[in-house]
Amino acid sequence: MTQKDKNESCCGSDAGDARSSCCKVESMISVDERGQMVLPKEIRERANIHAGDKLAVVSWEKDGKISCLTLIKAEELAEIVKDMLGPLIKDVL
């Protein structure tokens, strides 16, 4: 594998396109005895997460086991639901 291949984004050449998305390993974190985790400061800053923010934990299952957890800001999730259900509710009323 060449150096260029190692540095190439998993998102491909359109990584700057706002419509594209990508997942990558940002950090490794540990769970303490009380089940708590700490999001690294750099990730909190990039995600604009502040003390007191509410996050929805969304799980993805495969073969009956949770294989992925995603954090979504609660207000952003509310907007997504509103955008998806809004047109449906208008049609019903």
Image (cartoon, rainbow, N blue to C red):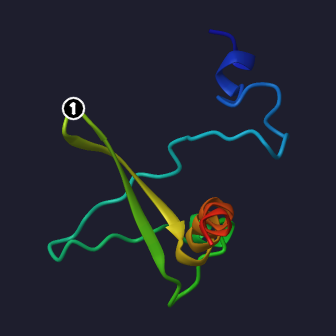
Q: Quadrant of residue 88?
A: bottom right
Q: Which residue is mark 1?
A: 63
Q: Is residue 62 above or below residue 52?
A: above
Q: Is residue 21 left or right of residue 30?
A: right
x, y percentage for residue 3? 70, 18
Q: Amino acid at mark 1?
A: Asp
For residue 31, which quarter of the picture? bottom left
Image coordinates for residue 30, horizontal then vertical, percent: 29, 60
Q: Nearer the viewer, residue 14 or 30?
A: 14
Dividing the picture into quadrants, the one containing residue 9 is top right
Left or right of residue 58: residue 88: right
Q: Which image quarter is the C terminus in?
A: bottom right
Tell me if residue 88 comes above or below residue 35 in the rendering: above
Instruction: Give the percent coordinates (x, y) of residue 59.
Output: 35, 53
* Secondary structure state at the residue bearing disc 1: loop
Residue lying furthest front in this view?
93
Instruction: Tell me residue 80's x, y (percent).
Output: 62, 64
- Outermost residue toward the left in this view: 33
Q: In the orientation shown, which residue stands out farthest toward the top? A: 1
Total numbered labels placed on residues in the image: 1
